Amino acid sequence: MPLTGNTGPVAAAAWLAELGLHSEEPRWHVEILIGAGHDAPHDDAPTLLRVDLYSEEWGYLFRHAARESWIRVTDVPFVHGRDDHGLLPGTPKLRNLGALARCLEARFEIRLSLPDAVIRTSLRGADLAIRTWLAVW
């Protein structure tokens, strides 16, 4: 995967612009919790895809079967703590994150519940734009 300097901040800024969003503050964040099946997404859910977007980086955490992978992208993708599922080499560009979600569903025979995602953000009025982005994954 070819990456350029400042990949995390550039990708996060491009994501924000593509969704038609902006921030009044230089530092902003979006956290999206996506559970599987009928489980409500929460920080301690046994199966969880958490997408983190910040003004200076983006990343994701995937937890399933008591194993966890946490990947962050600043200037390059790197493992933050653990990569039990071996996801680092397949980390896509941010705009292609939906493809990773579909691969996780197939590999682990799960169904991520995108409509039930929990969104936490510092961006006012961003919920609809983020849900629309998730819907096209």
Image (cartoon, rainbow, N blue to C red):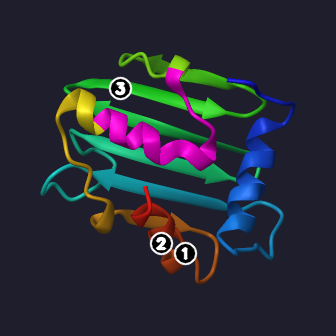
Within 10 Å of the Cα at label 1, are there few (<14), some (14-19), or many (20+) other Cα atoms?
A: some
**Side of 130 relative to 58 (left or right):** left
**Side of 107 relative to 98 (left or right):** left
Residue drawn at x 38%, y 54% is 33
Q: Are marks 2 and 1 in contact (CB under 8 Å)?
A: yes
Along the polypeptide, which appears first: circle 1 or circle 3? 3
> Which residue is under mark 2?
132
Give the answer, above or below, for where 32 lies relative to 44: below
Quadrant in the picture for the C terminus = bottom left
Give the answer, above or below, for where 130 lies relative to 98: below
> Which residue is under mark 3?
68
> Which residue is under mark 1?
129
Indicate the position of residue 47 as horizontal and vertical percent values.
Answer: 24, 40
- Quadrant in the rendering for residue 42: bottom left
User: Which region is colored magenta?
Assistant: 90-104
Distance CA(mark 3)–CA(mark 2): 27 Å
* SS class, disc 1: helix
Residue that protrudes farthest toward the left in the picture: 38
Residue 114 included in the magenta stretch of the image: no
Along the polypeptide, which appears first: circle 3 or circle 2? 3
Instruction: Give 71 or 129, whichever is nearer the viewer.
Output: 129
Distance CA(mark 1)–CA(mark 3): 28 Å
* SS class, disc 2: helix
Residue drawn at x 73%, y 26% is 76
Q: Are marks 3 and 2 in contact (CB under 8 Å)?
A: no
Chief SS of the magenta region: helix
The residue type indicated by label 3 comes to Glu
- Quadrant in the rendering for residue 107: top left
Indicate the position of residue 126 as horizontal and vertical percent values.
Answer: 58, 77
The residue type indicated by label 1 comes to Ala
Residue drawn at x 54%, y 17% is 89
* SS class, disc 3: strand
